[in-house]
Amino acid sequence: MITKEKLLINLHTLKGRIARKPAVYTTDFPKTMKEGLYRFNQTIIAMRIFQTIFFLLIFVSPLIANCQMAPLITPRMRVIIDNDFGGDPDGLFQLTHLLLSPSVEIRAIIGTHLNARDGFDPSKTQADNATKKAHELLSVMKMDGKIPLIAGSNTGMPNDSTPVKSDAVDFILKEALRTDTKLPLYVLCGAGLTEIASAALTKPEIAEKLTLIWIGGAEYSGLALPPPNGSAVEYNLNIDIFAARALFNRSQVNLWQVPRNVYRQALISYAELATRIKPNGEIGKYLFNTLENLIGRLQKYKFNIGETYVLGDSPLVLLTALQSSFEADPSSSDYMNNPCPIITSSGVYQSNPSGRKIRVYQHIDTRLMFGDFFSKLELFKN
């Protein structure tokens, strides 16, 4: 391994070699000129070698020694992660990826509820269980106590105009109303919208102080077709239809939506799970085993999912941590600015040409998204 000490020793040796031959004074002009040119060339070569060693010492050595991300990468945005970690394991993959991303400052992790009849967790303490699952992951990564873990409401909103009260709602409000930072705030929702909708209803002025990125909602007519036998009401929207109605119909929150036809593009194979995730330390084993256990449970019910799995929450990382370097934006993914539809009481879209513009994604860069995840897992393992 190249260390700073070795580089300094090599640099010292090089300086000694350059200075070893003493100057010779003579009246023989051609000989003196020839030797002068020789020394000049040697000096240029030495300077180039010195520059190379200096670059290695300052920039490359820390990376080799620490096997971590470059220390020059610092947060340029704040994020609040809101997800049903006790449900589909894709939320745990997304959480891991964000925890390994130095360009985001994670302000809090919120565990949220599922639909009351959800098979992943039919209990009455779904949000509490989700928070425990997030804590379990942080423990595996040895990040206990570094980021606030907050349980959201264990139930959805009673209607589309009455917010729930929870510590999670209070935290979103407090963070959105901060005046001591210029870092933009993103609220990342990979499940239902109970907490952010309740926050927006409680203090509507936060709408202009954050961007909500939501994994959820069905396909838009004319833009994509639903999957075969797909439900009319998309899974995440169905977690809390009242909350979705509050955000779409009543609020002015800046919304980036990743609908079902797009989050289904985040497809990973079992072979990739086994070769690119499982070998990467304890967190790799944890993620792989979590998903493999689910596949085993599904097989007991004669449900064959084949050899792929949709890590549908991972676009939350792509659209934040992996924005472009200049003119920051998720530049490798495509979207349209559409009028926000009305969501009906049955949970389906109704056209609303006068609705505020929302960003609806059409395509995501899965190469960047998964390639970055695999690489960060490998770095973290070391």
Image (cartoon, rainbow, N blue to C red):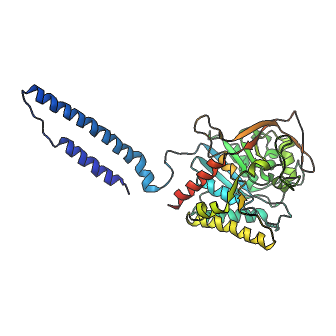
Residue 57 located left or right of residue 294: left
Question: In which image quadrant can residue 121 be found?
Answer: bottom right
Work out whether 169 lies above or below 37.
below
Which residue is rendered at x = 32% and y = 50% of the image? 7
* Residue 146 picture location, percent across and down: 59, 58
* Residue 295 picture location, percent across and down: 73, 68
Question: In which image quadrant can residue 302 be found?
Answer: bottom right
* Residue 324 picture location, percent across and down: 61, 39
* Residue 348 picture location, percent across and down: 89, 48
Of residues 150 and 59, the one nearer the viewer is: 59
Question: In which image quadrant can residue 334 be found?
Answer: top right
Quarter that holds the N terminus = bottom left
Residue 254 located left or right of residue 69: right
Q: Residue furthest toward the left?
A: 27
Q: Residue furthest toward the bottom?
A: 300
Q: Is residue 36 visible?
A: yes
Of residues 240 and 227, the one nearer the viewer is: 227
Q: Is residue 150 visible?
A: no
Question: Total marks drawn?
Answer: 0
Q: Residue furthest toward the right?
A: 345
Of residues 13 and 269, the one nearer the viewer is: 269
